[in-house]
Amino acid sequence: MTGTYSDAPREPLITLVEARDVVRLLRHFAETHGPGTDEGQDAYALATELAGRLPSE
């Protein structure tokens, strides 16, 4: 079975502005819950990883 794919332009799953907002909110969450908590450390690690994937301004 083969499928056909549209050549029409597609919207990204998340825009750059949205991704930057996610990183900002994750950093805020990490700071609010304290760097010593598991949740804070996980949020900071994820924010750092995602920020590294974003193009610089």
Image (cartoon, grey):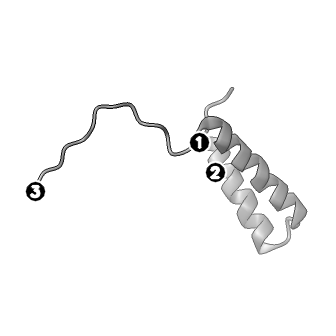
Left/right of residue 35 with respect to residue 4 in the rendered view = right
State which tag comes first along the sequence, 1 or 3.
3
Left/right of residue 40 with respect to residue 49 in the rendered view = right
Residue 38 picture location, percent across and down: 76, 73
- Quadrant of the rendering where the N terminus is positioned: bottom left
Left/right of residue 8 with respect to residue 19 in the rendered view = left
Q: Residue at x 47, y 37 (%)?
A: 11
Which residue is label 1 attached to?
Answer: 53
Residue 39, compared with residue 57, is above or below; it is: below
State which tag comes first along the sequence, 2 or 3.
3
In the structure shown, which secondary structural element does the residue marked by tag 2 occupy?
A: helix
Disc 2 to disc 1: CB gap under 8 Å: yes
In the structure shown, which secondary structural element does the residue marked by tag 3 occupy?
A: loop
Residue 55 picture location, percent across and down: 61, 32
Spatial distance from mark 2 to mark 3, Cα to Cα?
38 Å
Spatial distance from mark 1 to mark 3, Cα to Cα?
35 Å
Which residue is label 3 attached to?
Answer: 1
User: Quick one: label 2, few (<14), some, or many (20+) residues within 10 Å?
Assistant: few
Q: Residue at x 70, y 52 (%)?
A: 47
Q: Most extreme residue toward the bottom, as rendered?
A: 38
In the structure shown, which secondary structural element does the residue marked by tag 1 occupy?
A: helix
Q: Quadrant of residue 28?
A: bottom right
Which residue is label 2 attached to?
Answer: 49
User: Quick one: label 3, few (<14), some, or many (20+) residues within 10 Å?
Assistant: few
Residue 32 picture location, percent across and down: 89, 62
Give the amino acid at mark 3.
Met
- Quadrant of the rendering where the C terminus is positioned: top right
Give the amino acid at mark 2.
Glu
